Image (cartoon, rainbow, N blue to C red):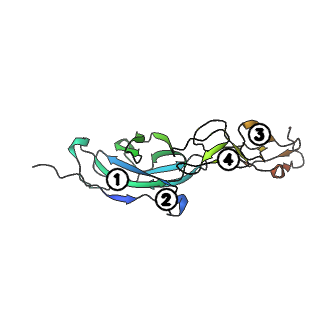
Amino acid sequence: KAPAPLLITVLSLTLLSRAGLVASTDICYTVVTRDRYLDGWNGGILTITDTDTNVAAATSTGPERGCKYEPSYGHTCERTETACLPCGTYEAQTGGGSFSSERSWLIRDTSWSTVAEASGVESAIFTACSASCGLGSEAVSNTECEACPAGKYSDVDGVGPCTRCEAGKYNEAVGATSSDACLACEAGKASDVVGATSESMCTTCDAGKYASA
């Protein structure tokens, strides 16, 4: 008896950071999750995280238990979903649950090219956007770039995102092209803010403590 055809469930991924809303500038990707033991991901979750903000942009619980399979995939059940993401750099990785070695996933762009894939708990990084931005700027849509805001800089060509100044430094300039634009707080002051946008964010050290410039 021939095996049943692959059952594909098409759903939208949870867009956590955007409250479920899809902006016109977002880029939509096809996310394919697979399980080779046909019993689902057993509590595992694929999380797509914005590497700049460290905030989850989308999640998937993978294929459902009891899904049908396709022999050409090596008896692997599959689920297909859509994730629409703002321009940026993302890291995708599964975590939680059990039997992680049975999981695999891949992400395809609108031309059906694979931009990221991994198996088990391995992670992969990809960039959403095709805009080409110069130094001191980052992509804000698939075709548009904007200058890095205060507190950030970009010293490479590409889509970004701009890099935040490290704690203890600040940058008041827009469109900074080097980390040199991040100025250290003056002696006797410090800041634990990453991406500080003003010298006023440097505060005087507590009594008994010091900070060198």
Question: Are circles 3 and 2 on residues that touch, CB within 8 Å?
Answer: no
Q: What element carries label 1?
A: strand
Residue positioned most to the left: 1
| For discs 4 and 1, the disc positioned in front in the rendered view | 4
Question: Mark 4, residues whose alpha carbon is within 10 Å: few (<14), some, or many (≥20)?
Answer: many
The span from disc 2 to disc 1 (Cα, nearest Å) is 16 Å
Residue 162 visible within the image:
no
Which disc is residue 181 wearing? Answer: 3
Q: Is mark 3 on a helix, strand or loop?
A: helix
Mark found first going from the N terminus, 2 or 1: 2
The span from disc 2 to disc 4 (Cα, nearest Å) is 26 Å
Mark found first going from the N terminus, 4 or 3: 4
Q: In this view, does 71 lie above or below 62?
A: above
Which disc is residue 15 wearing? Answer: 2
Which disc is residue 80 wearing? Answer: 1
Residue drawn at point x = 52 percent, y = 54 percent? 57
Mark found first going from the N terminus, 2 or 4: 2
Residue, disc 4: 147
Disc 4 residue type (three-letter):
Ala
The span from disc 1 to disc 3 (Cα, nearest Å) is 44 Å
Disc 1 residue type (three-letter):
Thr
Residue 56 visible within the image:
yes
Residue positioned most to the front: 143
Mark found first going from the N terminus, 1 or 3: 1
Residue drawn at point x = 81 percent, y = 52 percent? 201
Residue drawn at point x = 17 percent, y = 52 percent? 4
Q: Where is residue 104 in the image (x, y as percent from the top left)?
A: 37, 43
Q: What element carries label 2?
A: loop
Q: Which of 66 and 97 is in front in this view?
A: 66
Question: Are circles 4 and 3 on residues that touch, CB within 8 Å?
Answer: no
Q: In this view, does 2 lie above or below 9?
A: above
Q: Where is residue 166 in the image (x, y as percent from the top left)?
A: 72, 42
